[in-house]
Amino acid sequence: MTTENKPSLLVLLGPTAVGKTKTSIEIAKLFNCEIISGDSMQVYRQMDIGTAKITVEEMDGIPHHLIDIHDPDEAYSVAEFQEQCRRLIGEIHDRGRIPMIVGGTGLYIESVCYGFQFTDVGADEQFRSEQFAYAESHGAEALHDRLRLVDPMSAERLHVNDQRRIVRALEIYHLTNTTLSDQMAAQSKESPYDLCIVGLTMDRQILYKRIEDRIDLMLQQGLIEEVTELMKKGYGKGLISMQGLGYKEVISFLEDELTREEMVTLLKRDTRRFAKRQLSWFRHMGDIVWIDVTDKEKYSENFIEIRDIIAGKLLSVIE
């Protein structure tokens, strides 16, 4: 505990491909941490390459949580993530260790950091069916445009292919006459934890180059084969998991909707845009201490800075 009443919580966040994995392992070793994945896609089993899932070797003995906990056809929500994190944070503290969330899914991480309340506004199954049917007949862009008209902030943070969350945001407006973004803005920013949030950032063009190199590596590692196997097992493109970056583009290639070159170009473009949305989301979060990791030659210097930030914030835990 770092205060009399609040348990400590470390968070390491940043856009995709910025280098969170290596840094998180070194932090965990230094500060006796267990890591909770803050990535909404790494919960799915058999989806390893496309999610850049950490390997057992990369974990280097550090306990990791909320990885490989669902099959691709099982739903996963921010409310479930929040509930599991609350439990895990308590259990990790009970073991005398420090919990650290590592990832880039902004809403998920923020919901835990600030104890968002997810009120059950109910459901309208007919409305949902109508929205999915509209997307089927008019395209994903048209559905996304519907959300943009009523809730532009939510539309900005949700990918055009994230139809489940887009429909839910539309449904919330339909049922309550208030937008999801307004409801989130009304959430308390008082954290139930003694937070230490470190964000990694870098020059945008260098980040984009890292993203493109990572996608090339994913393809070399067998991303297309991974998606092919998932589809053979019956995990189709209608699943939310299969609408994730890397999966929907490869499915379009496998179904002859895109050439390989078009698929690669689209995947790189969409991933760059995703990183931009991540950074936009994090900008509206408070309490983040940003570290610029553009110069990889300064890794040791940057890590010392991160170490000192954490030590200064959680000194009583370290002692």
Image (tube, rainbow, N blue to C red):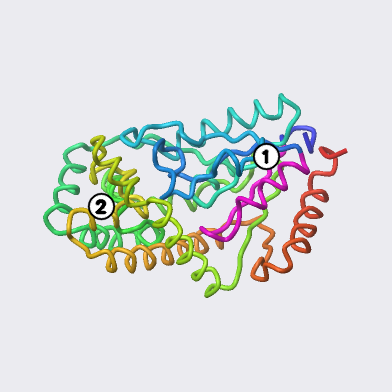
Q: Nearer the viewer, residue 62 or 291?
A: 62
Q: Which residues are magenta?
A: 8-31
Q: Which residue is mark 1?
A: 193
Q: Which residue is mark 2?
A: 251
Residue 40 in picture, x, y percent from top left: 45, 44
Instruction: Check the picture and name the quadrant holding the N terminus.
Output: top right
Q: Is residue 92 above or below residue 116?
A: above
Amino acid on which the number 1 mark rests in the picture: Tyr
Q: Residue at x 57, y 57 (%)?
A: 14
Q: Nearer the viewer, residue 134 or 297?
A: 297
Residue 308 in picture, x, y percent from top left: 81, 54
Which residue is at the far right? Answer: 319
Q: Is residue 124 above or below residue 287?
A: above
Q: CA distance from mark 2 to mark 1?
A: 41 Å
User: Quadrant of residue 65 in the image?
Assistant: top right
Residue 297 in picture, x, y percent from top left: 71, 69
Q: Is residue 177 visible?
A: no
Q: Nearer the viewer, mark 2 or mark 1?
A: 2
Q: Secondary structure at mark 2?
A: helix
Which residue is at the far bottom? Answer: 205
Q: Nearer the viewer, residue 256 or 208?
A: 256
Q: Residue at x 52, y 52 (%)?
A: 104
